[in-house]
């Protein structure tokens, strides 16, 4: 803004010649040499006696007379206006004088309040998206000027910071396909990152993604279908068959002759089911161009069985076959797992599919065949925080098969080439740490609690307690049970104490207390049992008291 001196406007004033100037040296009519006051006091600025105030020969300027004179920048007479092309002070309009002057191509003018971050910029322009200034008065949350909307920054063309899912790929995002994010229609996931093979998300450029880069498990290291994923459709059934005989467990169900590819296995630590006698089998498929199929054991604590694999578990109560359950991985996705239960007929020649609601007190016993939702509470859905997984294949793991008993063992799987990754140092079994009492208690908690309470992504997010045994713990204090339960506040109100496990005091330990309950919201496990396992309860009590 240029500096100006405001002119003195004299209107209607007649300046008369001085007839008798006191103090004139020569007594003449020339005002030169006046000694009666400062120069100009007589109205003759240059003292030459002509009455011309500024000495330019045109008389004093009068703002508004239509004649530009003296210090006037302009004079349009009666048309002078502060909002026009000449102000009332005969000054040309400039940005910052506080007047809105369209003739100066101004869109606004707040005088000294003009600010590039305010409602009127220093150039008397209204704030505009793309001018490079963040102007909240213009509802902007960003403004990067020429970079707006180019992806060079996170600022959109509308001067709004990008958000994942708005369809604009900002500098902090790898992709953004709007409503297609996370659907698989593109390779862009919900968090605006690009899918990579092995992350569990099947993008548009992938045929499958089973959360690993193992070849031969149905989804290859480049996320293309392979091996087990190419099995014939009748081998893979996403919908449960109507009868057990159709699932492939038996070659002759009436004679109880197992199919040739079915093998029995027994977990080292058993889940309590009110005293039911249980038998378990697994069928690992013969897959295209693979001999044998591959179990992904890259995480030794969380195996992934190959596509086409089936696991069965039979329950006998009071000497009668009650039910047989099946768990079947039929596809490459983490959700591609079928759970179903079959109730045996009285002659035990066939078992029929149980409704998803389950059957209470099946066949006149106290044994409940679970609903599908109860199955998922223990085996998990594959979703974050839902419980289950790595225990989705409960009982079939490195820890559970580390035995020399009947059925398939970890050593068998190693020797037969079923595992993608072998245990370190030529190990063929994993023993839990500590004494025999330590191992028994840790194993019991692993089998009965760890399938829900684990620190995997899909384990129960609350409470943050891990009871799943891991192969990497060499000492009892290194186990998840010890680290997350012993001496840790429970947050669960009960009369005996305040800790999950209080060393030396089982009755003051929330875990023991909840194991001792049935028929209330306090009971643990919450499903699958109506009778306290007194042997297991005493085992855990003795272990806690010995800590």
Image: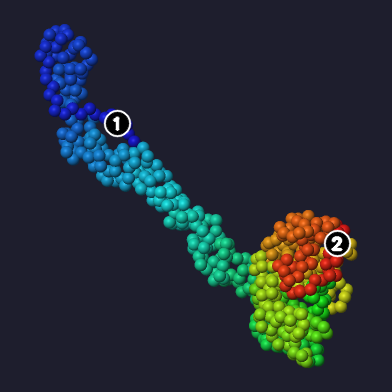
Check the image and name the residue furthest to the right: 436
Residue 247's place in the image compared with 488, above or below, is below
- Please give the residue where the numbered disc 1 appears in the rendered image: 4
Q: Which numbered mark, 1 or 2, is in the foreground of this view? A: 2
Q: CA distance from mark 1 to mark 2?
A: 94 Å
Residue 320: % across, % down: 80, 86
Q: Residues within 10 Å of mark 1 (few under 14, many from 20)?
A: few
Q: Position of residue 526 (x, y in %)?
A: 72, 70
Location of mark 2 (residue): 543
Q: Quadrant of the N terminus?
A: top left
Farthest residue toward the left? 19
Q: Which residue is drawn at the image coordinates 14% and 12% (left, top)?
A: 21
Between residue 161 and residue 3, name the one nearer to us: 161
Instruction: Judge whether residue 305 can be spotted in this image.
Output: yes
Circle 1/circle 2 CB separation < 8 Å: no
Q: Residue at x 65, y 84 (%)?
A: 233
Q: Secondary structure at mark 1?
A: loop
Image side of residue 138 versus residue 245, left or right = left
Residue 291 visible in this rendered orientation of the protein: no
Whether residue 284 is situated above or below residue 540 in the rendered picture: below
Screen quadrant of the C terminus: bottom right
Give the crowd class for mark 2: few <14, some 14-19, many >=20 residues within 10 Å.
some
Q: Position of residue 170 (x, y in %)?
A: 51, 57
Placement of 154 over or under 37, stated as above or below = below
The label shown at residue 191 is none
**In percent of the image, x 85 and y 66: which residue is there?**
538
Q: Is residue 478 left or right of residue 45?
A: right
Residue lying farthest to the top in this orientation:
25
- Name the residue at 34% across, 41% down: 110
Which of the 4 quarters of the picture holds residue 505?
bottom right
């Amino acid at each position: 803004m240029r500096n100006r001196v405001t002119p003195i406007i004299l209107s209607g004033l007649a300046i008369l010649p001085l007839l008798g100037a006191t103090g004139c040296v020569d007594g003449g009519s020339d005002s030169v040499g006046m000694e009666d006051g400062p120069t100009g006091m007589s109205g003759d600025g240059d003292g030459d006696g002509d009455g011309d105030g500024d000495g330019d020969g045109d008389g004093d300027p009068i703002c508004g007379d239509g004649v530009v004179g003296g210090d006037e920048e302009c004079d349009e007479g009666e048309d002078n206006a502060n909002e026009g092309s000449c102000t009332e002070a005969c000054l040309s309009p400039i940005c910052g004088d506080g007047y809105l002057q369209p003739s100066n191509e101004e869109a606004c003018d707040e005088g000294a309040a003009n600010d590039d971050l305010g409602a009127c910029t220093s150039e008397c322009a209204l704030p505009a998206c793309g001018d490079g200034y963040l102007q909240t008065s213009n509802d902007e949350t960003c403004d990067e000027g020429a970079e707006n909307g180019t992806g060079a920054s996170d600022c959109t063309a509308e001067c709004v910071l990008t958000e994942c899912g708005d369809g604009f790929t900002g500098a902090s995002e790898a992709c953004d396909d709007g409503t297609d994010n996370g659907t698989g229609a593109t390779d862009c996931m919900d968090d605006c990152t690009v899918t990579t093979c092995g992350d569990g998300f099947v993008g548009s450029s992938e045929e499958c993604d089973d959360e690993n880069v193992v070849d031969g498990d149905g989804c290859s290291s480049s996320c293309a279908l392979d091996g087990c994923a190419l099995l014939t459709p009748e081998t893979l059934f996403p919908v449960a068959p109507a009868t057990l005989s159709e699932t492939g467990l038996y070659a002759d169900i009436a004679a109880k002759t197992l199919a040739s590819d079915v093998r029995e296995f027994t977990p080292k630590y058993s889940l309590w089911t009110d005293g039911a006698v249980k038998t378990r089998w697994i069928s690992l498929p013969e897959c295209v161009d693979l001999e044998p199929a591959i179990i992904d054991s890259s995480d030794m604590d969380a195996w992934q069985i190959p596509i086409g694999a089936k696991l069965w578990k039979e329950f006998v109560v009071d000497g009668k076959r009650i039910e047989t359950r099946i768990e079947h991985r039929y596809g490459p996705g983490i959700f591609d797992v079928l759970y179903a239960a079959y109730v045996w007929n009285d002659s035990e020649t066939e078992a029929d599919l149980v409704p998803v609601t389950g059957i209470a007190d099946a066949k006149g016993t106290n044994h409940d065949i679970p609903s599908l939702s109860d199955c998922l509470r223990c085996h998990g859905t594959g979703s974050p925080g839902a419980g289950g997984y790595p225990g989705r294949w409960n009982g079939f793991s490195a820890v559970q098969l580390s035995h020399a008993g009947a059925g398939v063992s970890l050593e068998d799987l190693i020797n037969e080439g079923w595992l993608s990754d072998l245990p370190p140092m030529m190990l063929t079994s994993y023993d839990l740490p500590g004494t025999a009492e330590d191992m028994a208690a840790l194993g019991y908690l692993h089998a009965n609690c760890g399938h829900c309470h684990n620190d995997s992504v899909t384990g129960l997010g609350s409470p943050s307690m891990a009871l799943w045994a891991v192969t990497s713990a060499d000492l009892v204090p290194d186990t998840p049970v010890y680290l997350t339960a012993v001496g840790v506040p429970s947050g669960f109100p009960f009369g005996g104490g305040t800790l999950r496990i209080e060393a030396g005091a089982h009755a003051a330990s929330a875990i023991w207390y909840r194991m001792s309950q049935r028929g209330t919201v306090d009971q643990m496990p919450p499903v699958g049992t109506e009778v306290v396992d007194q042997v297991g309860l005493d085992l855990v009590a003795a272990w806690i008291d010995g800590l």
